[in-house]
Image (cartoon, helix red, strand yellow):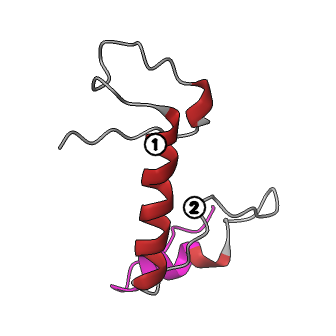
């Protein structure tokens, strides 16, 4: 099975006649694939929020989860000078 990843595109705006895409691909098939993936995420206990970036205040080091993401192995962000 061919897998295609569309990041940041509404499936309804993609040109499915593009020869780089698998034949027979449609917006409906992409939407069904997204639904299946979100259900699988939820079953695995992951937040099924679409993986959208979370906002944070300008001038900060990013969302609180950023430190937790790299901190699991003792890493840390370099402080500004």
Q: Where is the C terminus found, in terms of image quarters?
A: bottom right
* Majority secondary structure of magenta residues: loop
Kindly indicate the quadrant of the structure image that contains residue 25: top left
**Stretch of the chain drawn in magenta:** 66-81
Q: Relative to 58, is 46 above or below? A: below
Between the residue at mark 2 and the residue at mark 1, the CA separation in whole angstroms equals 14 Å
| Residue that lies at the very extreme toward the left in this rendered image | 1
Residue drawn 51% across the image and 70% down it: 77
Q: Relative to 29, is 12 above or below? A: above
Residue 37 x/y as whole percent: 42, 63
Q: Of callouts 2 and 1, which one flags the residue occurring earlier in the amino acid sequence?
A: 1
Residue 8 x/y as whole percent: 58, 39
Mark 2 touches mark 1? (CB < 8 Å): no
Secondary element at image label 1: helix
Closer to the eye: label 2 or 1: 1
Q: Relative to 9, is 38 above or below? A: below
Q: Nearer the viewer, residue 7 or 12?
A: 12
Residue 76 among those drawn in magenta: yes
Q: Where is the N terminus found, in terms of image quarters?
A: top left
- Crowding around mark 2 (Cα neighbors within 10 Å: few <14, some 14 to 19, many 20+) is few
Residue 26 among those drawn in magenta: no
Q: Nearer the viewer, residue 63 or 32?
A: 32
Horizontal arrangement in the rendering, residue 23 relative to residue 17 (left or right): left
Residue drawn 69% across the image and 64% down it: 54
Q: Nearer the viewer, residue 66 or 20?
A: 20
Residue drawn 47% across the image and 52% down it: 32
Q: Which residue carries the number 2 mark?
A: 50
Q: Which residue carries the number 1 mark?
A: 30
């Amino acid at each position: 099975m061919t897998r295609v990843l569309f990041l940041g595109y509404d499936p309804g705006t993609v040109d499915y006649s593009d020869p780089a895409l698998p034949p027979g691909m449609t917006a409906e098939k992409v939407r069904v694939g997204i639904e299946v993936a979100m259900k699988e995420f939820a079953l695995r206990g992951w937040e099924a929020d679409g993986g959208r970036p979370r906002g944070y205040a300008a001038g900060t080091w990013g969302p609180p989860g950023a430190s937790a993401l790299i901190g699991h192995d003792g890493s840390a962000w370099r402080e500004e000078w």
